[in-house]
Amino acid sequence: MRVLVNGKAPSFSATAIVGGCEIAKNFSLDQFLGEKYVVLFFYPKDFTFVCPTEIWAFQERLADFEKRNVALVGCSTDSEFTHLAWLETPRERGGIRGVTFPLISDANRTIAFNYGVIAGSWSEDASGNASVVGEMVAYRGLFLIDRDGIVQHCVINNMQLGRNVDETLRMVDALQHAEKFGDVCPANWHSGQKSMKPTLEGLGEFFE
C-alpha cells in the first residue's frame, strides 16, 4: 500500500449523488482545486450498520466543515442507484434521507484501489480464471486534501471501527493553523491553544 500523504490526491471522474437526490456524471475533486479543502471518506456499504452512523455524524457537523471551507465527500463501491435508494430511505429504517453532501459511486473499485483502501484482492490462475480473496469493498479510509490537491492527513480503519468526526475537524483546524502561521501543532492540540515554532527555541517557549 503506497503512502499518499504529501503527494497529489489521485484524480478521478465518477458518478455521484449530489444534494441527496441528483445523479451527477463526471464528478471530480478537481472542481475544488485552488478553492476548497476536501475531506474524502470511504465506507464499505450502503444499507449496513456502522456506515449510517458515520454518515449521519458527518451530516450533523456539515456546517462546521463548510465554515472551514471544506467540501465533505463520501464514497463507497455501491452503484449510484443504491446510493439513491438509501438516500430515499428514512433514518428510522436504516436510511440516510436528508443527507446532502455528495456520495460517489465507485462501482468499478478503481477509486478505492488508487487511494489504497480496497479490502479485497484478486488474482488469476494459470488458466486465466480469476479469484478474489476477501470482499472487494472499501475500508473506512479518510483523506484530508488541501487546496492544492495535496493529501495532508489520512486514517484507515477496519470495517468494524467507526471514525471520530471531531478528530477530523481538529485535523482541519491544525492544517489551516499551520498554513496561516507557519507553526506546528503538538499532540492533542485544539484551535485556540498554543502552537509552537519548528525550532529548538520554539520548543523551549512552548514548555515555559
Image (cartoon, helix red, strand yellow):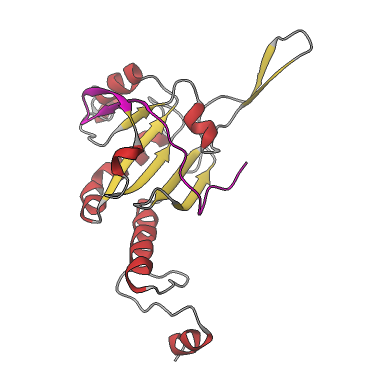
What is the magenta segment's predominant secondary structure? loop
Q: Position of residue 38 (x, y in %)?
A: 34, 47
Q: Where is residue 196 in the image (x, y as percent from the top left)?
A: 43, 79
Q: Where is residue 207 in the image (x, y as percent from the top left)?
A: 47, 87
Instruction: Judge from the rendering whether residue 94 lies leftward or rightward of residue 140; answer left or right.
Output: left
Q: Position of residue 39 (x, y in %)?
A: 36, 46
The answer to whether residue 99 is above or below residue 154 is above
Q: In which quarter of the image is residue 176?
A: bottom left
Q: Does the magenta stretch include residue 126?
A: no
Q: Is residue 13 magenta?
A: yes
Look at the image and give the residue range highlighted in magenta. 1-26
Q: Specify whether residue 182 is in view.
A: yes
Q: Which residue lies furthest to the right in this view?
A: 126
The answer to whether residue 80 is above or below residue 206 is above
Q: Specify whether residue 163 is in view.
A: no
Q: Quadrant location of the N terminus? A: top right
Of 39 and 145, the residue lying toward us: 145
The answer to whether residue 81 is above or below residue 161 is above
- At a point 29% along the width and 19% down the height, the residue shown is 85
- At a point 37% along the width and 51% down the height, the residue shown is 148
Of 83 and 94, the residue lying toward us: 83
- At a point 22% along the width and 35% down the height, the residue shown is 100
Q: Quadrant location of the C terminus? A: bottom left
